[in-house]
Structure formats: C-alpha cells, structure tokens
Image (cartoon, rainbow, N blue to C red):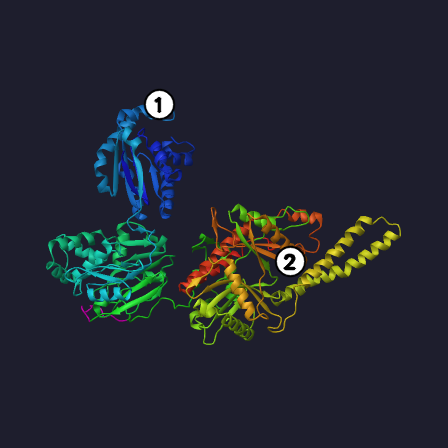
Amino acid sequence: MAELRIPQMALVLLIGSSGSGKSTFAREKFAPFETLSSDFFRGLVSNDENDQAATASAFEALRFVAAQRLTAGLLTVVDATNVRSEDRRGFVELARAHDVLPVAIVLDVPERICIDRTEARADRAFGVGVIKRQQDALRRSMRGLGREGFRRIHILGGVEEIEAATIVREPLLNDLRGETGPFDVIGDIHGCRSELEALLGELGYELQRDDTGRAVDAEHPDGRRAVFLGDLVDRGPDTPGVLRLAMGMVRNGHALAVQGNHEAKLVRALQGKKVQTGHGLAESLSQLAAESPEFRADVEQFAHGLISHLVLDDGRLVVAHAGLIESYHGRASGRVRAFALYGDTTGETDEYGLPVRLRWAEDYRGAAMVLYGHTPTLEPEWVNNTMCLDTGCVFGGRLTALRYPEREIVSVPAEQVWYVPVKPLAPPAEPKTERAAGTLSIDDVLGKQIVETGSHGRITVREDFAAGALEVISRWSIDPRWLVTLPPTMSPPATSKREHLLEHPDEAFAYYRSEGVNDLVCEEKHMGSRAVVVLTRNPQRFDAPAGWRGVVFTRTGRAFFDDRLTDEFLQRLDAAVEQAGLWAELETDWLVLDAELLPWSLKAGELIRAQYASVGAGATAALPRAVAALEQASAGGVEVRDLLQRTRQRKEDAESYVDAYRAYAAESDGLKGVQLAPFQLLAAEGRTFETRPHSWHLEIAARLAAADGELIRVTRSRSVRLDDEASVTEATIWWEELTANGGEGMVVKPMANLTRAGRGLVQPGIKVRGREYLRIIYGPDYTAPANLSRLRERNVAHKRALALREYALGLEALERFVRREPLWRVHQAVFAVLAMESEPVDPRL
C-alpha cells in the first residue's frame, strides 16, 4: 500500500488523462470541499460539464476559488487532466503566490483502460484520439515535474496501486502549534558562549558538561525550553562552544532553534561553495577548523536542518530570525524564508554599506506575538506585539531573552566588545515613527474589522456599525487608556410557555440543560446600571497622572460621576478592598470589577422623568376620569360594560406601571444613597478571573460588603443542580419571591463561569425578569391578552449571538491589557463591543 505524504497546507494537482480515475480518487481520498473539479466548474459557468467552449471561463473561476482557499490556508486539490506543463504552470505559480507547496499526484493508468472507461460513459462524447494525445503529453512531461517546481511528486502506476493508496497529511516543519511552552526566547548570540551560559543560568537552566568541562546541554527544572532566534555563529570568540551547547539542547528536547542568515552562509561554506567570508564567517571557519571532522559534519547537518520560522502555542507565538509579517506565518516558500532570514529591504544600502531595512513591525497587526533578532538595538521594546531581542552582545551590548508567556525580559551584559560593528550600536539618528504606547490611530477602526478572540474565534465588525461606535467613543467615552473592557449585553430566556408570563426560569434552565451544563448559580438582579470599576494604586499602569485612583464607567464607556465624586467613591472602595485583605491576597495594585450601580435613577433619572413619569402621569390622570364617566353612563342604562371593564383594567395596569418604575427611582445626594453591587472580579495584575467559579466571585463581593456595608451591597444567590429537582424548585420559588416583592428578577449563570459545550461558548448569563418589572419595559398594557400574544413571538436568537460576541470581545480586551499589549490592541476589542451595540436588536430584550 502506497502512502502519499502531503503537507497539510498545499496545492495538490491530480495529473492523468480522462478515464484514469482522478475524480473517484479525489472523492475517496479527500474531503468534499477540498477538491475543485474542472468538470464541475464547467457546469457552473455553462450548465454543461462537457462544454469544452467553457473551459477558459471554468478554469478562471476555479483558480479564483483556489486562491481564496489558499489564502485561508486550506488544503486544495485540483481535479483536471493537467497533463501538459503549460496547464500546470499557472497552478505552480498560484501556489508560490500564496506561499504553499505544490504537490503532484500522477495517476499513470494504461491507455486501454482509460479508453474503455471513457467509452462506457454516455456523457463523454470525445474520441479515442483525445485520450491518446493526453497519454502522450503525460509521458513527455512526467519526468520534468521536479523542474517545474513541484516539491513532492507521487506517481501511482496501475489501477490496483491507485485504489490501495492512502493519503497521509503532515504538518509543515514550521508548524509546532502543539508546543505550548513555557519558552525562553534568546536573541542573537554570535559565538558569545560565556554570555550564553550566564544567561541560561539567570533563566534557571542547569548546565551539563562533558568530561573536559565543555557545556553540552542545559535543562530547566520546571520544564521550560529555550528558543534560539538564529545567528548562533560568527564574530564572537567561541562559535564551536555555542554550537555544542545549542545543538545538545535541541537534540535532547530542551531547546528549539530557527536558522539565521549567518547559519545559512556557514552551511554553504561548509559544503565547499564559494562565499564571501566577511561579517565574521572567517572567524567561525577558523574556530571550526580546530574541531574534529565529525563535529564539523554535525554542525553542517544541524545548521542545514534549521527552518526559517516556527509557529508555536496554537499560533499565539511566531519566532523568526528577522521577523515575519502575518500573511507568511506558517507558510513555506522561498520568499517566506528570505523574509525570515534577511527581513524586508529596499534593495538599497546605507552609508555603512548595510541593507536599508523596511520597518515591517510598525505595520504589523497580527494576533500572534512575533519575536525576532537580526538587527541589533540597545534595548528591546514592544512594537505592535513584536519584539527584537538582538541587543548586540557581540558588539559589547547585552544578550537578551524574553520569558514567554510572562513577557519578562532577562539580560546579561557582554564581557567585552568582541567584534567592532560596522554601524555603531546606538539608537537610530532619525526620529522613531512608531506610535507612542498610548497613541491610537483612526485607521485602526475605520472600515470592516476582524478581531481574533481566544474564546470565540474571529469576530467581524461591519463598517457601518464601526462608524456608530466611532462617534460614541470619540464624543462621550472616557479616555481610551482606561477603557480596558466593556461588559456584554445579556440575553433573556426563550419566551415562557406559562400563561400571563413572558419570562420564567424554566426556559433558562432548559437552555443550560440542552448545553450539558448541570451546575448553575442564580444571582439576584439588581435594578441599577451596569458599571465597570477600575481601581488602582498604580496610576502608571494605566498611563494616568499621579494621584489617579481609577474610573467608574457605563456599558458604553461613559463616566458615571464627575472627578470629585469618582475620587471619593474610589477612596471608599479602596479602603474596603484593603480591609477585606484583597490587595495582599491577590498580590496586585489594581483590579477591575463588574457590578451594578444603584439606584437606577443615578444614570436613568432623565429617562424616568421624561418617558416613564410622563406616561404614568397622563395615564393615572385620564383613566380614573374615564372610568368615572363610563360608570355614570352605565348607571344611566348605556351598554358600556365591556368598555368599562377594559378601562378599569387599563387603570389598574397604569397604577402598577407607576409603582414599578417608582421602586427604582430612589434619590441620591453625592454618594449618599449610592451603592455598588459587585458580582465579578474581572482582572488584576497578571491574570483574569473568568475561569474562577461564580461562588469565588460572590465570596469576594461579600467580603467587600462586610468591609463597607453602606457603599457595597451584597448580591444574594442560590446554587442549582439541574439533576436535582428540589434545587430547581427552590430557585424558582426564590425568583417568584424576588419578583413579587418588587425585584427585577435574577440572572442564571454556569457556576463554573466561562463554559464551553459542543457548539462552542455557552451563554455566560441569562436574565429572567419578573412580570411587573417587564411592565416598565413593554408598557402599562403589555399583559393584555392580545399584546402578550404578539410579544410571545419575539426571537432571542440574535440577542444571544450578540451577547456571546460581546462577552468574548470583553474578555479579549482584558486579556490583552493584562498581557501588556499595545493600547491599540486593547482598544480594538473594546471598540468592537461598542460597534456590536449598533446592530439592530429589539432593545426591550
């Protein structure tokens, strides 16, 4: 049985004459959408798979679809005869243009079999001569497939070998997404063995030496691994010593390495090819000449086997000697390798005779962190989620590593200037063009946006929705430096099947039961305003002025209080956090809370006065007089019984409406009467808390309330197990008591907090509101049978999808802030939440 090994990302051409079985082979060996058939595309453009006049249009459409698939990194198989080199040339060029490998699978079937198969098909009208010409073209061009650029060629001879063949998909050599670290990524070493040993010691590695005392391996007791960014060799005093240590670490699984331009040149020299020996190569060759032939052979094999870049940690980390733009991540081609080894250059040279390099990192917007070296700098610094770790050790600078994922820099100084640089190791004379850490660009949010989230994949923001968000964030929101997240909208349950009710806990429990979530928590829903509180003792962490304590903002990023009240509020909250022991326990000097701020009228006072109160006043003034008039008419013998009954009901509904909104219109004076009801601790220095169970978050909130019961309000809750009917019944009765006493209702959440099920992310919370509270939302007469019947037709699917996207974006923003990513990266996710709010969804849901 033949095993055909092909890369997971490739353009595969099936090659064979008509009747060779290409379509059957494709159907049996590949997934349906992976194969693009020329016959099928003829049918698409002409309604006839055999219309040869449509061939040009069919292949134009096929190549377009193939290009889209290759852009997305998907394996693509072309099912066409492809027997002539000119037929294949365009596909090889297409593979190169998308930096994927072209693969040829030749189905070499005897001519007689191809003829018999074709003649047996009623839909094939072309003659035997066509197949003979195809077979002849195949024979003449088959030997030249390698010269055409195919990186892998599989030739299957005969029907039996074709039927028995199996496809084995192999990840590219650069695809190490399953390697999650932690890693210690080390910049250019250039033969500085002593400094490398010192840096590994600083990083916690234990050196292992051979009988002569030479370092031959280094292992970290916690299982960390080093990642060498290339340029191990040249210029420095001990290239063999560096190679001996690095090769031992790689061989024993304690390190990974990518090739640098100096290793590439050394390989050519060791292979006996003619190369220029400048830039330190002469020193390396001289030092290696003193080593054994076996060692030199090992060095050649090791350096030759290094690849251009590695994709690690599920795509979150990319390492390449000179860096790599996002569209090249995980790809394989000559230009990808050239970029990874040499960077992007203009083709010109500067006054020192060195290539003029384009500053690709300034335009980088990828989700993956890119770590690289190649161009020495005095200090490593973040530029758009990329960092250069070459700090010029061999030139008298430092040898630098970055701990991943901690993002901690570790450096050791050079022992001396080992090699005088052609270009002085100093900051560039020209002013830097990259943005300051706290600067945003409007280009980041204009047009359609795609935000990559760790919990919900890619989320698209439409251009028209982004325009609405831009107005909100530019006119009314707080300083974007402090807008580290926005809370999501919350979905209601499906419409209740119970008479006279729109919402009931039954449907919330049913949703989580369908998702396989058994352990829930039901939290009292405070009738206030959703608030995010940023509290800090370290204003520098937020690029804020000295004395800044934080901010309290709404779901749309607007401040709740003026500066004086904000400071007073946060001073009280800071004292409560201190008394509860949370600053020390969490080892942080800042935190972010998700909460409700009460009373509702603090934010919605104008809404209550202008909308609810005016409706209530008009209704309670007019309807009693209408009832009196109808009662008088009825007493006089006029038949108005039905109208009188309806009007009396409307009068009662109006009074209930007034009672409902008045319950949430408490007065406040300054902070008097203001309460914060926190229900989740979102983040602190170094971590987020979405995987902590809600019981932990509620215990934190209870400790704060115990510290300052006047300012901080407890959120009551009930635990529920869906496999325990008693706990379900108890929670339902509790909801009925809450809503009967004027409460808004409750929120049902997975106890585990962030939860995934078979279909992806599970709703983080479902709000279940009471019958009388919903009267505020839907109007005084919403419980009338006709109105209730119409409202039962509401569809919550869009609201649920919106809630999940906003939830994932809010988490992503926090995680990026905690990881100290650039402001534009945090702001990208926050801005997307605001844009989601522009989507047309019934605001009453």
Q: Is residue 553 visible?
A: no
| Residue 309 percent location from the top left of the image | 28, 54
User: Measuring 80% from the left and 56% from the top, which residue is drawn there?
Assistant: 626
What's the mark number on residue 830? Answer: none
What's the mark number on residue 738? Answer: 2
Q: Is residue 550 visible?
A: yes
Magenta: predominant secondary structure element? loop
What's the mark number on residue 120? Answer: 1
Q: In the displayed structure, does residue 814 sit left or right of residue 237?
A: right
Say whether disc 2 or disc 1 marks the residue closer to the N-terminus: 1
Q: In the displayed structure, does residue 748 sit left or right of residue 543?
A: right
Task: Give how far apart the Cα atoms at labels 2 and 1 are.
Answer: 77 Å
Q: Secondary structure at mark 2?
A: helix
| Residue 738 percent location from the top left of the image | 64, 58
Q: In the displayed structure, does residue 243 sit left or right of residue 662?
A: left
Q: Nearer the viewer, mark 2 or mark 1?
A: 2
Give the position of the N terminus as an image quadrant.
top left
Q: Which residue is more in the foreground, 467 or 77?
A: 77
| Residue 569 percent location from the top left of the image | 55, 72
Magenta-colored stretch includes residue 566: no
Count residues near mark 2 (Cα–Cα under 10 Å), then give few for <14, some for 14-19, many for 20+: some
Count residues near mark 1 (Cα–Cα under 10 Å), then give few for <14, some for 14-19, many for 20+: few
- Above/below status of 621 relative to 273: below
For the record, the magenta segment spans: 416-426
